[in-house]
Image: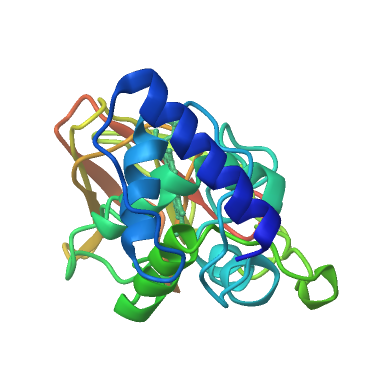
Amino acid sequence: MTEVTEHRLARRIKALRASRGLKMFRWNRRCCFVKTSLILVMSSLPVIAHEPVTTRLTWTQEISRIFYRRCLSCHSEKSSIPLVAYDQVRPWAKAISEEVRERRMPPWGAVRGFGEFRDDASLTLSEIEMIVHWVEGGAPRGEDIYLPEVPDAERPQYNKPSPGFLVTNGYILRRDFTAAGIRPAQVIEGGSIQVSAILPDGGVRNLVWVRDYRKGPACIYWFRDAIGLPKRTRLLMHPPGTSASLISTAKPER
Ligand code: HEC
């Protein structure tokens, strides 16, 4: 903690105490008391200019790497909540900590065992801990030289993802189609969608089952291996009013 920050913080707390008549805090420069009072102060102040940094984790070294791997597919520059650059992430720090701790983010949503996917987006326990500690420690930026290159959100998957084509309940393919992934299209907020393919030989391929659907940045569930769907395959959606886009690596044909 720098002296300047500490000083500023002390002033803030003093001012706050005076204005709100909070119980006196004993100012202890070393112990976690600082942190406790900080939390109290922060919950009542709209903005704190500089929080003291109490962690060695930094955005440029550890945290950006977790985000680029786990969050960018949905929180790219083009999304409603871009989380690519430090300045975009910093204002969300508290919310991020809460979302990952509660395991609401990333919202994987797909029921396990129903379809197989390349990237189960769930965070590991240690990734959650790192993010939470980083936020609690003041969410420091770190030195820019450590910053990894921003990956192209689509590149790790396929060079040329198609926009996909929309299928509804009962849709029958008129040509062979190779599905690389699937994106829920029409699903009510908080609702679910289950998609299966009935192959011409009667076999069933479970494609995806998403529960607790949340609207937002369009998210593609990429299959672990591309799924060949022969001509005359029938798609079943449950509930029937839902729809989804099948994504292929090649130009979709209908
Ligand atoms: C599978 C897609 C997906 C992934 C991956 C994902 N998110 Fe999200 N995120 C969403 C959606 C959808 C919303 C809601 C967007 C909206 O309200 O516009 C959201 C919203 C948020 C919000 C705002 C919550 C609020 O308070 O409203 C935060 C913070 C967030 N995400 C953090 C993260 C972090 C951190 C990661 C990576 C660890 C992550 N997300 C990964 C889809 C995703």
Taking the image as shown, residue 237 lies to the left or right of residue 32, namely left
Closer to us: 15 or 72:
15
> Image point 54% across, 70% down: which residue?
66
Front-lying residue, 121 or 99? 99
Q: As drawn, is 11 to the left or to the right of 186?
A: right
**Residue 80 in sight:** yes
Q: Nearer the viewer, residue 212 or 140?
A: 140
Q: Position of residue 136 (x, y in %)?
A: 42, 59
Q: In which quarter of the image is residue 17?
A: top left
Coloring scheme used: rainbow
Which residue is situated farthest in the right direction here?
Answer: 145
Residue 227 visible in image: no
Residue in the image at 33% along x and 21% along y: 20
In the image: residue 2, left or right of residue 166 = right
In the displayed orientation, state which residue is furthest to the top: 19
- The image quadrant where one finds ligand 1 is top left
Q: Tell me which residue sits at (31%, 46%) in the image.
A: 25
141, above or below 174, in the image: below
Q: Locate residue 236, reporting x and y percent.
A: 21, 43
Q: Place residue 140 in its image quadrant.
A: bottom right
Q: Observer-nearest residue: 174 or 73?
A: 73
The quadrant of the image that shows the N terminus is: bottom right
x, y percentage for residue 62? 59, 76
Q: How many labels does the image show?
A: 0
Q: Which residue is drawn at 67% across and 60% down?
A: 3
